[in-house]
Amino acid sequence: MKTWNKKNISREVVKALCDTYGVDALTASIMARRGIVEGKDILYFKETDLRFLHNPFLFANMEDAVDRILNAKEEGEKILVFGDSDVDGVTSTAVLYGYLKEQGYDVQWRLPLGSDAYGLSTAAVDDFAKQYGSLIITVDCGISNVQEIAHANELGIDVIVTDHHNPPETLPAAYTVIDPKLPGSGYPFPDISGAAVAYKLVSALRFSNSDLYKQEITLLNVRPSESEDYYIDCLKVRNLVQKEHISERAAQGTASVTHTKLPAFLTGQQIFVWNEPVIQKQLSEIFGSGVEFNMMDFRPQIAKLIPQLADESLLAVKDMSRIAKYSGEPASEIEGFFNLFVTFAERQTANAKNTADEQNDLQLVMLAALADIMPLKDENRILVRAGTGSMNGGRLRPGLAELFARLGMTGKKICSTDLSWTVIPSLNAAGRMGQSNVALEMLLSKECSSSPSFPSSEEFCHL
């Protein structure tokens, strides 16, 4: 007979979880027993919105990768996406290749076939060089291909490595490396799949089509101190990522702007404020009427999106943000401003096609997370939930619909158990038999097909 040991927990902790995050007592007690009591962890159990995923530009090298790929398109360069033969590698390849092909890049893919070893091979580099290719992007591999990437460099081929495996002591001399496990990567969560890394790159490429890409923007706010002084808070933002923050304290009518950090910090910046007339008046009271700040009032823009905020102050608005309640401490006005700015920017840059394509990508990212047994914590929970939700919402990508039909799963509500024990083994079988191209071609298919190029149900499921 088994003995169950229940960890003792405080009633106060359970009540705090219920009151703060709106969970029921049973859920709160389970969370408490599992040590899930901090807002940053609870967020991923409560939220499903993709807004809560980590920004791809948190990768320190993401902008370099995006710029190199954009330049390749502008110059008409040939690109090779090189992946791995397992489910993570195949889905990674499908995500990145599918996007680049859709956008009109001169792109091809390659996977290890037959008895080919894991990772980028010298043969693949040589074959690509013979086609006058000049850019290789690895997905779910590459971080350990020191010699192969050195060989590519000798042939004048740049290599962008996107991977999620532990980096070796000696890194390859790639054009740039995007790997959440790389020291100094800048990314806050190391345990995402290779397909998730590829998805992050595609998300960054999608964002690069907006006017906000690489724009330096400063959010500025003025707030009174406990005395008669003011605080001037400035937050520098690039690609919707916080880059630098300063806070200046100045007494009314006694300060000189040249004696502050503001001129150096604000030079060359687009300055956004909330309620420009009020901010301008406060700055005049601090520095005198002779000092002018060229600012743009952001409040009318956000009011078009969220009308109920039209007459609210930042002090009132900051606590309305969903993300603020997970921070563990009261949000500042400038943080509330940043959250509003990101929400506005993401909605402005969204379009129906990108949303549909993203849903298709997330189905593959979800399969990769389950196949590689990624820990279901942090943003992996949102990625898996989004992928299964998309599948069950009648938006199954055509290639997967073909596979589901062959597996007798059409119309069935999908859960992670079905995927882990039926779909993923079928996809993995192709790679184990040296035919990963079969799985990739199916995933890339734009329509369900019964053409001879696809194996039959029995052949595919028992490769």
Image (cartoon, rainbow, N blue to C red):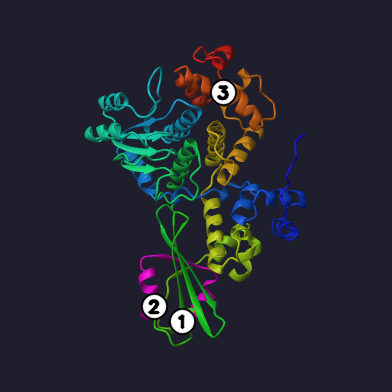
**Label 1 with label 2: CB-CB less than 8 Å:** yes
> Could you tell me if residue 313 is visible in this image?
no
**Closer to us: 210 or 156:** 156
Q: Report the amino acid beneath label 1.
A: Ala
Sequence-wise, which precedes: disc 3 or disc 1?
1
Q: How many residues crowd mark 2 within 10 Å: few (<14), some (14–19), many (20+)?
A: some
Instruction: Check disc 1 and report the residue beneath it.
Output: 250
Q: Is residue 394 above or below residue 19?
A: above
Instruction: Check disc 2 and report the residue beneath it.
Output: 260
Q: Report the amino acid beneath label 3.
A: Pro
Q: CA distance from mark 3 to mark 1?
A: 64 Å
Q: How many residues crowd mark 3 within 10 Å: few (<14), some (14–19), many (20+)?
A: some
Q: Which residue occupies the extreme left position in the image? A: 154
> Could you tell me if residue 344 is visible in this image?
yes
Report the side of 32 relative to 87 (left or right): right
Q: Secondary structure at mark 1?
A: strand
Which contiguous range is marked in magenta? Answer: 258-282
Q: Secondary structure at mark 2?
A: loop
Q: Report the amino acid beneath label 2.
A: Thr
Instruction: Check disc 3 and report the residue beneath it.
Output: 425
Based on the picture, tell me whether residue 262 belongs to the magenta stretch: yes
In the rendering, at what x and y percent does residue 199 appear?
48, 39
Q: Which of the two discs, 3 and 1, sits closer to the camera?
A: 3
